[in-house]
Amino acid sequence: MAKQETITDLTNDLVGVKNQLLDGSIEMETAKEFNNTAGKILNTIKVQLAHQALVLACENHGRTPFAIPYLENQKCLPKT
């Protein structure tokens, strides 16, 4: 599998793992571990998106956004 750069890459890799399971070219345990890791990546993305939405909501209402130190250095989405 190639280095994953985008959510589309992760999705394509997950489909690849499913296909490998169906044709028997990957062991069930390996597929489980890959899927477990993918789930953790997706949950991390959901947290980052939720935090960004809260920051933008605060900024759009003239409030100072609260900081979560762990997410503090994340890149912000541009205002629209």
Image (cartoon, helix red, strand yellow):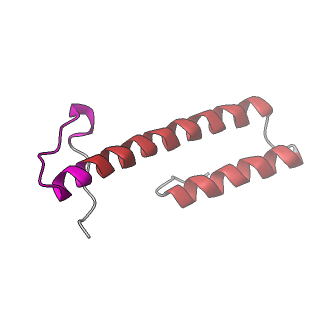
Q: Over which residues does the magenta segment extend?
A: 55-72
Residue 65 in the image: state x and y as whole percent.
Answer: 17, 44
Q: Residue 24: x and y, percent? A: 87, 43
Query: Residue at image x 57%, y 35%?
Result: 37
Q: Is residue 45 rendered magenta in the image?
A: no
Total number of numbered discs in the rendering: 0
Q: Residue 39's spot in the image, x, y percent?
A: 57, 38
Relative horizontal placement of residue 38, taking residue 15 as reference (left or right): left
* Most distant residue in the front direction: 61
Residue at 72% over, 53% down? 16
Vertical side of 22 occupied by 67: above or below: above
For the view shown, which residue lies furthest in the right direction? Answer: 23
**Left or right of 20: which side holds 79?**
left
- As drawn, which residue projects farthest toward the top? 29
Residue 62: image quadrant is: bottom left
The quadrant holding residue 29 is top right
Q: Nearer the viewer, residue 70 or 57?
A: 57
Within the magenta stretch, is there residue 67? yes
Please state which of residues 1 and 67 is positioned toward the viewer in this rendering. Answer: 67
> Relative to residue 20, is residue 56 drawn left or right?
left
Please indicate whether residue 10 sits to the left or right of residue 43 in the image: right
Q: Quadrant of residue 21?
A: top right
Task: Quarter of the image for the C terminus: give it.
Answer: bottom left
Viewer-side residue, 27 vs 58? 58
x and y percentages locating residue 22 in the rendered image: 86, 47
